[in-house]
Amino acid sequence: MQLFKEFVEYITEASGAGEIADAKGKAFELELAKNLHPKKQYPKHHNDETGRSPEAVAADLRKRLGHEEYEKVAGHAAKAAQEHIAKTGHRPSEVHWTSVEGQVSKTTGKNDAGNQSDLVYKHGNQHYGISAKYGSAPGARSPGMKDLASMSGMKHEHLQKLIDAHHEAIHKIMSSHVKSTSNAQRHKEFKEIASGAKGPKAKAAADLANKTSLEHRTAIAGHLAKHFGNLASKDHAGMTEVVRKLTASHGTETPMMKVHYNPKTNKTDISHPKEDFDRAMSKVKHFSVEHKGMYVHIHAHDNDGKKHSIAKLSIKNKSSSPYTNMVGSSSLGSGLKKLSAQ
């Protein structure tokens, strides 16, 4: 039953919901930057991974989401910007969109590797970073599989064999339908086949490939859960640092805040990840790890023995097809905020 539930969720994402959520998240970043900018304009200091300007990315996102949906996100970003200014008292004199790794350091002039701020602004003589989040349960970070092996203590060679077995199983199912040689083209072909455009037989193969992918990723999540569980039982300090990484709660040279807008509740949450995490961890006695489908759930147990959901790690295909790289995707559990507030 659990596997079936995970499969339904995966198919929902594969149908395009995950890509739409990513597009909304990117739109929120850009519009938040625009509304924080002293001239209410897109920052021109940095481009995205493909060299496109913020204006070009915004125009593309507007086409993908549709004008009405884009404007809805833009309105939410304007509201979040106003609340951020009201809460912090900051009036940015300049704003940078730092969507590419290394751009925070380039903006501030400091070695700030690991700072995942989507925006950096200047108030007075100080730079501040913002991790912009949009949605009901946005991801905290997306660690690579090699990183997950290192965090959990699992041998990377063992994990790689499991990943290779996944790729081989998918190729075996789809070999008579996907003819491209590059993974980028295979991904494109697979998405078309999965949509039903190549006929019912090909679509049935794609459905089987998706189900098989889920089974392999569920097995991989189980292996990682076992290793994380071993770490939690033997090394509390070490597991605390793992959870810090998964929840993106580490310290940075440039002070970083999180601005999260939840469109379901129409509320903005402005927080300081490192300070909140440290406060929450002062009340944690030990951790436990639970495996469910393609998910690894990490729980914290407080001094009174109560269990709190701290983080959820899912093993996903990066762009919702089994022909893209497998990655981890971690999100915060509700227990972190509750523990921090106690």
Image: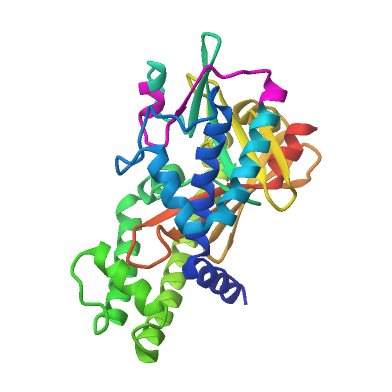
Viewer-proximal residue among 240 and 82 = 82
Decide whether residue 184 is among the magenta residues. no
As drawn, 305 above or below 210: above
* Residue lying at the far top of the rendered structure: 125
Viewer-proximal residue among 251 and 255 = 255
* Residue lying at the far left of the rendered structure: 181
Residue 113 locus on image (x, y percent):
39, 27
Residue 171 locus on image (x, y percent):
27, 75
Residue 237 locus on image (x, y percent):
56, 32
Dividing the image into 4 quarters, which one contains the N terminus? bottom right
Viewer-proximal residue among 289 and 337 = 337
Q: Is residue 108 left or right of residue 301?
A: left
Query: Residue at 71% across / 53% down in the picture?
Result: 264
Among the 4 quarters of the image, the one containing residue 105: top left
Query: Residue at 41% across / 40% down in the picture?
Result: 55
As drawn, 292 above or below 11: above
Q: Is residue 304 left or right of residue 56?
A: right
- Res. 342 visible in picture: yes
- Res. 239 visible in picture: no
Dividing the image into 4 quarters, which one contains the C terminus? top right
Residue 28 locus on image (x, y percent):
55, 43
Q: How is the image coloured?
A: rainbow
Query: Residue at 35% across / 50% down in the picture?
Result: 155
- Magenta residues span 85-106
As drawn, 50 above or below 1: above
Q: Is residue 60 left or right of residue 272?
A: left
Viewer-proximal residue among 81 and 151 = 81
The tally of labels here is 0
Decide whether residue 86 is among the magenta residues. yes
Among the 4 quarters of the image, the one containing residue 49: top left
